[in-house]
Every structure is written in structure tokens, then in C-alpha cells.
Amino acid sequence: MVDWRELAATGLGLGRAPYGPGTAGSAGAAALAWGAVVYGGTQGGYALLAVALLLYPLGRNLAEWAEREWGEDPSRFVLDEVAGYLLGAAIIWLAAGIPDAVDLLALFVLFRAFDILKPWPVSRLEEIGGGDGVMLDDIAAGILAAALLLLLF
């Protein structure tokens, strides 16, 4: 039987991708955001925000479980990428209106860049440690990516 913690921590299994599990988890989040665009109507941005906010405490606790099970900051744990990307998509939606596919793709590229390169303050938040550190760096990456997109477009 599949452990619900493993299923959630791996983003419904996306974190088990053999290459780029963080990118796979982010792509799953982008697909979810696109589903909100197509089916969510004007309230989709609020739905994405609610999901991102609910994923934070779940992810914080599951990150600590995942580190006990799989070692420090395991790559297969992608709930942090999902929460960070969805928060970025919600910010764009609520600040500028319903995003299109180009907006969500640009957010994906910037989010992954910030998550991988970890500029300040992303790198600083990662130093917090524990489940909060695992989650907060990706939350910051999502906020920074959305802010940059809003400034550029």
C-alpha cells in the first residue's frame, strides 16, 4: 500500500522522476495552475492562493518526515516546488488578471531559475533549516518570480 505521506511529498509521484524531480514537480504545479485558468473562472486565483497556503503547513511537516526517511533536503520531496509555483501563479492572477499560457510558462522558467540559483533572499531562507527552511526558499522563489514578471509585463 502506498503511504499517503510519500504520495503527497513526491507531488503525486512527480518527485520520483529520474531526472529533474524539482522541475517535474514544478511542471505538475504549472499544469494545475493551467487547469485553474481553464476551469476556475474569475475565482481561480483565490483557489490557487488557498491551495498554496494550505500546502505550507502540510509541506513543513512532511519535509521533516521526508528528511528522516530520505536524508537532508531530498530531491524527491517536491511539495515545496508545488507550493512556491502555485503561490507565484496566484500572485500574478490576483495582481494582473487571469494569466495566459505565456505568463505561466514565463513564471515556470523564472521560478526554476530562482529555485536552482537561490539568489538572496532565497538562499537566506534555506538556511533556516527544518521543514520551514525547505518550504520557505521555494515560497520566496515563487514570490520573486511573480514580482519580476509583474515588473516586466
Image (spheres, grey):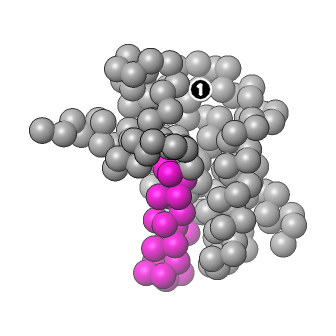
Report the predominant secondary structure element of the magenta stretch: helix
**Residue found at x 24% / y 40%:** 4
Q: Quadrant of residue 150?
A: bottom right
Callout 1 environment at 10 Å: few (<14), some (14 to 19), or many (20+)? many
Range covered by the magenta-colored residues: 24-45
| Residue 138 counted in the magenta span | no
Give how far across and how far down residue 46 sits, in percent.
52, 66
Q: Is residue 5 visible?
A: yes
**Residue found at x 74% / y 26%:** 124
Q: Amino acid at mark 1?
A: Gly
For the C terminus, which image quadrant? bottom right
For the N terminus, which image quadrant? top left
Give how far across and how far down residue 136 sits, in percent.
61, 35
Which residue in the structure is indicated by mark 1?
133
> Residue farthest to the right?
152
Left or right, 119 with reference to 40: right
Residue placed most toward the observer, 17 or 130: 17
Residue placed most toward the observer, 63 or 22: 22
